[in-house]
Image (cartoon, helix red, strand yellow):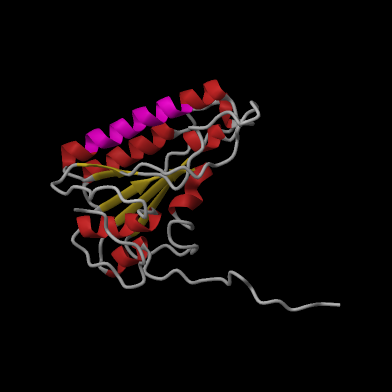
Amino acid sequence: RRESFNQPLPPVSNEDTLAECLSKLQIKQYHCAETEKYAHVTFFFNGGLEKQWHLEEREMVPSPKVATYDLQPEMNAAGVAQAMVRKIREGEQQFVMCNFAPPDMVGHTGKYEATVAACTETDRCIGEVLKACREYGYVFLVTADHGNAEKMYSETGGPHTAHTCYRVPFYMDGGSATFQAQRQEMALCDVAPTVLQLMGVPQPAAMTGSSILA
């Protein structure tokens, strides 16, 4: 026999995400990732929608074809960085974002040395993007939605391959704005409002977070 139950977490519609908000205001934007993380800068970033917003440009850089990413821990972070630098130099988009895959994807393998190589390459690539932002007048922001590579061994001594829930950094470089003093309640929902304030765009009512600019 079939039973009917109320859903404890019913589906929700995410309205006025950052990408949608920028699109409504005719602000050009660019989203980039390698194949393995492409959904994270499109479907997930846009609130669970496949839809590509007006003036939203997307670019997918091919991930290496290997059995497991510890065999090529740098993945194609370099390709993503090159695409980002190119777009920053062109200066056509006011909002340019990407995802760097290696720390997460290689961290999942549990291979320590490979993960060190993945983080080293990602750090180098972030440096290339930062350099371009400084040269062409973009405010640079970097954060993460979870951890992984910072914990490679479990409490029992074996490899740790899952995401972690530690607090993540949110770093800003360029411009004249500064962050508020850190508060415990700051969360990922504050990232989009912070970006909007940096761009001089009003925050829509649907966004429940708050800008953390001073």
Q: Is residue 209 above or below residue 8?
A: above
Most foreground residue, 146 or 85 = 146
Q: Position of residue 108 (x, y in %)?
A: 58, 35
Q: Is residue 175 left or right of residue 130?
A: left
- Magenta-drawn stretch contains 31: no
**Residue that lies at the very extreme toward the right in this rendered image:** 1
Residue 56 sits in which quadrant? bottom left
Q: Is residue 35 above or below residue 7?
A: above
Q: In the picture, which quadrant includes the N terminus?
A: bottom right
Of helix, strand and loop, which mostly describes the magenta segment?
helix
* Magenta-colored span: 118-132
- Magenta-drawn stretch contains 122: yes
Residue at 54% x, 33% y is 107
**Residue that lies at the very extreme toward the front in this rendered image:** 184
**Residue that lies at the very extreme toward the top in this rendered image:** 113
Residue at 49% x, 31% y is 75
Q: Position of residue 91 (x, y in %)?
A: 21, 47
Q: How many numbered circles does the render carry?
A: 0
Most foreground residue, 124 or 30 = 124
Q: Position of residue 53 (x, y in %)?
A: 38, 64
Most foreground residue, 132 or 102 = 102
Residue at 30% x, 61% y is 210
Q: Position of residue 190 (x, y in %)?
A: 33, 57
Residue at 26% x, 54% y is 212
